[in-house]
Image (tube, rainbow, N blue to C red):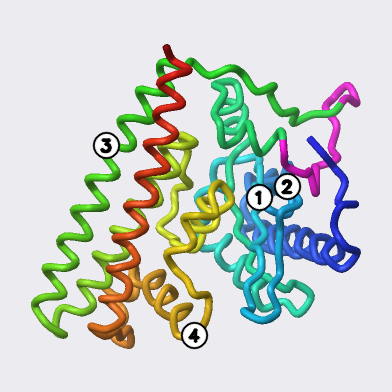
């Protein structure tokens, strides 16, 4: 894995130094606040940059305000750290408001044991991260003999036939789920404004399922999150064509997507959540396009996998 950020401008390099410092600071504070003996052994073992900044395909557009997000894989010591979704969300929120960080930061969290298992199985998503990613941080603690510890496994070769069968099943299952959720959302929308929040939640589910269809079919991996921003970000690092459905990237459409993102929780539980038939119609039309484009890309992937299997 690479360790250099020399392909980035100095300002961007300083930004990643700040991101790393905030993550380590927040984790240390959280561990101290826990107070339990076991929590004292919790560690961030590795922080890996992947996506456009690692590949050198990042962009910034001052006219539209669009800019590449930062994608990070946090490899941690204990399963408990992967289950603290609220904590990692708060870290992302702090980074978003930090004056030294100029963009969204998305963090996926896995244990070293899980990552190594995925690598040994030849899992596409993690293998690509290790091959193309940049190591930003590594826990310096050696083993008892003074040698490096917390080593990553060498990526294995996946079984082509099993990969194809798994991907085909993912595509079938999640395509049906996304289309069903979108159908139910349109039925709900036809009932009138009293059903707006229920419609928004169903549209969220249709979007989440569409992204899961794409990610699981193409990479056999999708993070365990309902956060549409994270799913969208990971998907567009694989194929930017998926992001075209949400354009143009300007007001009010950015707000329309944000309302969709928030719908998983707020549309069900927050009395202040409000949307309109106009917004719901825009969202539904875009989701319909998302499902179609994602399914087309999945079919392309399945055809390649089938050829490899044969």
Answer yes or no: do the residues labelled 3 and 1 have beta carbons within 8 Å? no
Identify the residue shown where x is 68% and y is 53%. Answer: 52
Which residue appears farthest toward the left when viewing the image? 191
The location of residue 217, given as percent across then percent down, is: 41, 36
Q: Which residues are magenta?
A: 132-147
Answer yes or no: do the residues labelled 4 and 2 have beta carbons within 8 Å? no
Check residue 51 in the rendering and tell me which mark sits there, or answer none. Answer: 1
Check residue 55 in the rendering and tell me which mark sits there, or answer none. Answer: 2
Check residue 172 in the rendering and tell me which mark sits there, or answer none. Answer: 3
Residue 266 falls in which quadrant of the image? bottom left
Q: Secondary structure at mark 3?
A: helix
Check residue 232 in the rendering and tell me which mark sits there, or answer none. Answer: none
The answer for how far apart the CA atoms under marks 3 and 1 are is: 27 Å
N-terminal label among 4 and 2: 2
Above/below status of 183 relative to 102: above
Above/below status of 30 relative to 98: above
In the rendered view of the protein, which quadrant contains the N terminus? top right
The location of residue 176, given as percent across then percent down, is: 22, 45
CA neighbours of label 3 inside 10 A, class few (<14), some (14 to 19), many (20+): few
CA neighbours of label 2 inside 10 A, class few (<14), some (14 to 19), many (20+): some
Q: Secondary structure at mark 2?
A: helix
């Amino acid at each position: 894995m690479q360790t250099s950020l020399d392909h980035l401008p100095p300002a961007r390099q300083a930004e990643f130094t700040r991101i790393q410092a905030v993550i380590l600071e927040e984790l240390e504070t959280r561990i101290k606040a826990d107070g339990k003996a076991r929590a004292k052994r919790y560690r961030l073992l590795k922080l890996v940059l992947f996506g456009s900044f690692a590949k050198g395909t990042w962009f910034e557009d001052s006219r539209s305000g669009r800019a590449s997000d930062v994608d990070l894989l946090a490899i941690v010591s204990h399963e408990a750290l992967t289950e603290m979704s609220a904590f990692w969300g708060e870290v992302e929120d702090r980074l978003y408001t930090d004056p030294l960080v100029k963009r969204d930061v998305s963090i996926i969290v896995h244990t070293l044991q899980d990552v190594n298992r995925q690598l040994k199985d030849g899992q596409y998503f993690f293998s690509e991260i290790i091959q193309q990613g940049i190591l930003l941080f590594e826990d310096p603690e050696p083993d008892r003999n003074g040698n490096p510890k917390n080593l990553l496994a060498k990526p294995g070769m996946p079984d082509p036939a099993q990969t194809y069968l798994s991907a085909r099943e993912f595509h079938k299952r999640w395509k049906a789920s996304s289309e069903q959720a979108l159908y139910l959302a349109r039925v709900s929308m036809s009932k009138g404004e009293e059903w707006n929040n229920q419609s928004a939640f169903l549209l969220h589910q249709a979007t989440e399922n569409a992204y899961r269809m794409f990610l699981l079919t193409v990479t056999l991996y999708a993070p365990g999150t309902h956060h549409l921003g994270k799913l969208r970000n990971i998907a567009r690092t694989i194929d930017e064509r998926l992001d075209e459905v949400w354009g143009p990237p300007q007001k009010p459409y950015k707000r329309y997507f944000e309302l969709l993102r928030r719908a998983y929780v707020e549309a069900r539980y927050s009395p202040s959540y409000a949307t309109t038939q106009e917004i719901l119609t825009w969202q539904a039309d875009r989701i319909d396009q998302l499902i179609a484009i994602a399914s087309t890309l999945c079919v392309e992937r399945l055809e390649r996998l089938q050829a490899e299997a044969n």
